[in-house]
Image: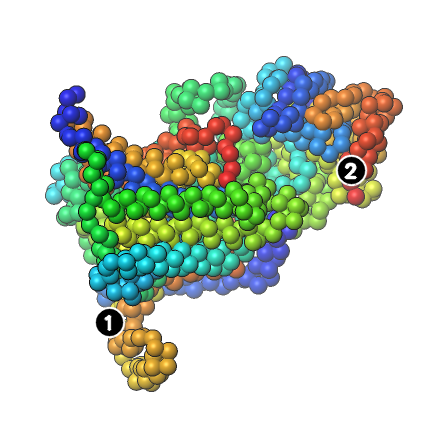
Amino acid sequence: MSILFLTTPEFWFDQIVNGLTTGSIYALVALGYTMVYGVLQLINFAHGEVFMIGAFAGYGVLLALGGQDISGVMIVVALVLALIAAGLASGATAIAIERLAYRPLRNAPRLAPLISAIGVSVFLSHLVDDGFLNGETKHYDQIFPAGKLSLGALNVSYLQLFLMGASLAMMAVLYWIIQRTKLGRSIRAVAESRDNAALMGVDVNRAIVATFALGAIMAGFAGVLYGLFFSSIRGSMGFIPGIKAFTAAVLGGIGSIPGAVVGGYFLGLAETVGRELLNEIPGVNLPNEWKDVVAFALLVLVLIFRPTGIFTQQEGKRA
Amino acid sequence: MAGATLSVRGLGMRFEGLAALADVDIEVPGGQIRGVIGPNGAGKTTLFNCLTGFYHPTSGEILLDGARIDGLATHEVSALGVSRTFQNIRLFANMTAIENVLVGSHTHITVGSGERRAPRRPSGHRLLDAARKIPGAPRAAGSAINELAGAVARPPAVRRVESEATDRARRLLQSVGLQRRENMIARNLPYGDQRRLELARALATRPRLLLLDEPTAGMNPQESASMVGLIRRIRDEFETTVVLIEHQMRVVMGVCEQITVLDYGRRIAEGSPAEVQQDARVVEAYLGTRAGTGGGHAAP
Amino acid sequence: MRSLRASWGRVQEQTWERIPSRLRPIVWFLIAFSVVFINRFDDTWMRMFFLVGLYATLGMGLNVVVGMAGLLDLGFVAFFATGAYTVAIFGSPVSPHDAHLNYWVLVPLAIGLGALIGVLLGLPVLPLRGDYLAIVTLGFGEIIRILALNMNDYTRGSSGLFEIRKPDLGFMVIEDVRAFYVMILVAALAVWFVTSRIRDSRVGRAWEAIREDEDVAAAMGINTTRYKLMAFATGAAVGAIGGAIYAPFIDFVAPQSFSLQVSINVLAIVIIGGMGNTTGVIAGSLILIGVPELLQFQETADFLQKFAWLRDVLNPVIHGFNTVTFLNLPDLPQPEDWGKKLALYRFVVFGLLMVIVMVLRPMGIFPSKRRELEFENPPEAELAASQGVG
């Protein structure tokens, strides 16, 4: 019992900060899953690859601007440019996927768009890995100033601070778009009922494309943040974060935007803090890979017991 | 026996605060042909969905020959003898006509004891219901393995029930006039034949209560008339109670012995065709303030 | 929705009606050829034939799940791994849990375990909507690999298990790649027989009905959860058979062999070959597994050497293009490497094909389950007639 106190408060604060950091990446990616599901009831299996494309776009920009040598104000400029490039690349990819692989199948049997989505996912990840990189892994340059903010037992590196802050800001902008703009209203209308929205004069196709694009932009941003934090990127990098982000979306109640965000942070914390808590039990020593198992177990449990999500009322509120 | 009696008592169905059905009472004696009419959105199809276990009603009870069937799973309700057709035809589109009918015979193509326990009504607690199934799991697994083994080995008993089922399916196709269509893919059948095939499939389940959702929708007067004859014949030959939703008044008045009228999810009238036609509330529901919506006379 | 599907159906029937029945002799000829001339092929070729047979077997298993019952399983590798590890853990002297059991005792155990895991995995998810199954199986395929990597006490982690006991027939031990090819061929035929028998039964009809319209299937009295579980378990059992044959063949069972790629391979074979169609699955396996293997052969490299001149023609074009566009495209590789390069891109092609097939031909390149009826699945009329006599 007392073992819990052998580990220092610093240790637990670190775990929480780590959890929130990965959680913000999950949340950003989960938004795309939940929005697309909200309007089309489709699991966009290629979303993890859209995230990967963003990571590579950001990587390319940072490399072009000097890589390791970027310093001073240029760091800010480079980061902003990398994020913009990632958003554009991911958004464009998602729009192309929607147009070529999903739209022709919108009225097809349920299985068809799912299989098409998997095809896109396989194609993109292997195109990057086998076609361009020959299986190599690329590494983001560590341009972000090292160092950390310390408040007593709480230590947060500047990079983590940036990650959490930036993702919160992005989600706030997205929320504003969805709630306050005409485009957002049309998305919400289509999510509520495609037929009724069409009757009310909403351009359904435009709303669907916008949904894909907005979700993809968030995923692209997340790709850059992932690269900055974890450094190594490759074509298949989207697979595990993709499954996790989907889990986050299901945890929060798929279709719900706030749910995806909460689900993302929850999953991030569950993986890090949850694993360490389990490790406190004598005789248990879970290696790092087990956090994938934790996420997956959570997904199955939620699907069985609360298919509408753990934070929602029984009537799942849509985006 | 002449079909099952159906008792619906205080049936209510709410969707996110919206009442699709409220306090509906219906008594249908065995062997009757009952019509359910009402303007669009009156809750007719919702009623059918409750009767067949597609929906679990939020209040009230449904009894078939005195036994509760509300809350049971769709396949359990079907096994107790409730079968239906659909407003927008829902055949197994890529299967042949006779395969569609054979799927309808599913529960009757069994070998051996065919013992069947009465299904248990769920408690409403997911965990409790799951736990209740655990003791039966080994037996369920055993019967599944048995069934697969029978399918592979095809012992004489399996072949016999299969060929009996095929004969029966062929007779059913014949009785709805599709004897020449048995190997056609369902989606390639003409519209009227698709309706007939759906009826044959529903009959294959050996229903004691047959629910027909707009059986003559989209048919011309001639086809409708022959469908009316068919429905009567089915009731007599197959000894089943029939409840049908219908918009074409000629059909309703021609075939139904009693009529229940729904409006806004409530029962507003019930009686013989003549009585219902004269009922002030019915006239108002159909011709009154909402006459322009085209509710009662939608069939083209 | 219905009319769109129907019009697709019509297009398919008009254009592709006769393809599978034409394809069928080719497929069977290739199989017969590989048996008759079994001693003419060297080990590389036999290895390719073995892999084609293995993936055809796995494809027939997944076809039960995806093609017949319409359940999208993205973690088929889990059952393949279950079969391979069962045989390896209990049948290898290097394993910490060697049970000293005969191979033939372990095969039914592998099949049983595969089916059991299929049921346990499907039980919570199958009553839910289909797309949840896809994501859960996708995750589960990955979990199995992580488990295999970390459960060192059983699997020896990434060091793997080897020296797996070979199948002993009494008069001979199956060691040679030729013998393994014949073994997988027998297994494939058995699986083909079993799955097509089931498809033509009440069970197969129930699966098809569920695939076509789950709600209506339930309204016809079909316990959809039960039949979905049966489909899932049947597919899993076949996956385990594949694994149990693969383990002694490859003689090295380690987590890296059980990646997502295996699941994608099998799924691509089923989808591209044509869902619900056995000949399509075999053809799919020949194309998707056989061709990439073939491309890596020395013979292929030797043959491609003849096209060295293409390189001399095209390289200047590439250089010119680079100067104009400021791009930096690399030269063409040496001709003998072309095959290997192409083989490397197989998954890029698979992914693309899956999308194209879904968009243009949702029933697969070799579709028409209906045309197949004329062969494998006599119309119920004849079936009944023949049975009535017998």
Is A117 or A81 nearer to us in this picture? A81
The secondary element bearing badge 2 is classed as: helix
Image x and y of residue A315, in percent: 52, 30
Farthest residue, direction top? B66
B120 above or below A131?
above
Report helix, strand or loop for mark 1: helix
Whether residue C332 can be seen here: yes
- Whole-percent x, y for residue B209 in the image: 67, 25
Q: Position of residue B272 (x, y in %)?
A: 83, 21
Which chain contains the residue that carries disc 2? B
Within-10-Å neighbours for mark 2: few <14, some 14–19, many 20+: few
Q: Nearer the viewer, residue A14 or A207?
A: A14
Task: Identify the residue at horizontal 83%, vertical 30% (top origin).
Answer: B288
Residue B293, numbered label: 2
The label shown at residue C298 is 1
Q: Nearer the viewer, mark 1 or mark 2?
A: 2
| Chain of the residue displaying label 1 | C
Viewer-nearest residue: C71 or C174: C71
Q: Residue at x 40, y 47 (%)?
A: A170
The amino acid sitting under disc 2 is Thr
Q: Residue at x 38, y 62 (%)?
A: C349
Image quarter for residue A264?
top left
**Residue type at tag 1:** Gln
Q: For residue C124, say whether it is visible.
A: no
On the picture, is A278 further left or further right than A265? Answer: left
Q: Nearer the viewer, residue C331 or A217?
A: A217
Rendered image quadrant of residue C333: bottom left
Q: Residue at x 24, y 61 (%)?
A: A70
| Left/right of residue C77 with respect to residue B156 in the rendered view | left
Label 1 – label 2 distance at C-alpha: 76 Å
